[in-house]
Amino acid sequence: MKPADVFLAVLVAVIWGLAFVASRIALDEFSPTLMTTLRFAIAAVPCLFVRKPDVSWPLLIAISFTLFLGQFLAQAYGIAQGVPVGLTSVIVQSQALFTIGFAAALFGERPTPMQTAGIGIATVGLLMICGTVGYDFSLSAFAIIMICPISFAIGNLLLRRAQNVRMFDLFAWLCLVAAVPLFALTLATDGPGPTWHALSHMSLTGLVCMILLGGVSTSIAYWLWGRLLRDYPAAQVVPFALLVPFVGSAASSLVFHETFGSLRLAGMVTVIGGIAVMLLAKRPQILPKIA
């Protein structure tokens, strides 16, 4: 990779890591549904200037509801219910485990021995993290946050079907498709009055957090990531995502003084190690179809 593109890959990972901190700060001011709505409403602004990509509406909705709406709404609710930000950043990246598992089950993509080992290592790490549930957040909060990597993984597989389209245009329209039902959900759960009050009394901190989440983390960062995946093999780009949980955990420790017990820290490191093994392994083989 060119040095400039290496810098961009690292920059995207840093932005995504800091976004977890921005989400936690924004949730002090907004409800999970309103924060997620604002995130995608801001990221959908480019739809005013770009055409809808040549992707069917059913596919566009399916990708948006899994890759964006399901993942980030669950993430917001999980953080709001007490799941630490640093731990959240690790759990979200476990999507690599579920992506490989779902690809094997649905498309016959047999994991390589290295990927199988990585899945086993990451699974052990998640089980270690499960052992810490109940100390500072509930089992229900953990169940909600686990929706993130599962939804993320399904969205990854659906995204494969949207080929030969401009990534910036696609992500903008995915954000719009997510923002519309999220706005309706916000009005239904929060009520029109509280929603308007939160918007009209938005603080400067809340505004900055939402611009970071919507304009920078979602719109710009996803576009840069898509461009890198277009220009380079995935094996060169995807490992940079391993920086996200390190940035998220470090930033959470500095901003929120988040601490990790020995078991949780070991589990987080084990998950990241398993993901590293999976991402650095060779691509899976396609199982031959049986007549």
Image (spheres, rainbow, N blue to C red):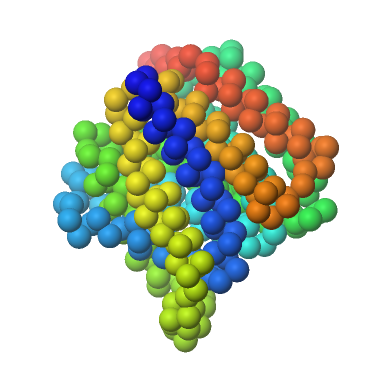
* Residue 287 in view (yes/no): no
Q: Please state if 60 lies on the left or on the right of 23 as rendered.
A: left
* Residue drawn at (54%, 56%) of the image: 22
Residue 40: x %, y % from top left: 38, 59
Residue 129 in view of the camera: yes
Residue 223 position in % (x across, y down): 32, 42
In the foreground, 108 or 191: 191
Q: Nearer the viewer, residue 49 or 201?
A: 201
Q: Position of residue 269 (x, y in %)?
A: 70, 31
Please tell me which residue is depicted at 56% across the width and 71% down the height of the picture: 29
Question: Is residue 191 left or right of 128 when viewed as pictured?
Answer: left
Nearer the observer, 238 or 69 = 238
Which quadrant, please, contains the C terminus? top left
Residue at coordinates 50% horizontally, 67% vertically from top-left?
Answer: 206
Q: How many marks?
A: 0
Vertical position of residue 199 compared to residue 274: above or below: below
Above or below 169: residue 82: below
Q: As displayed, is residue 103 above or below residue 191?
A: above
Which of 13/38 is in front? Answer: 13
List x then y, in percent, for residue 280. 52, 18
* 98 to the left or right of 224: right
- For the N terminus, the quadrant is top left
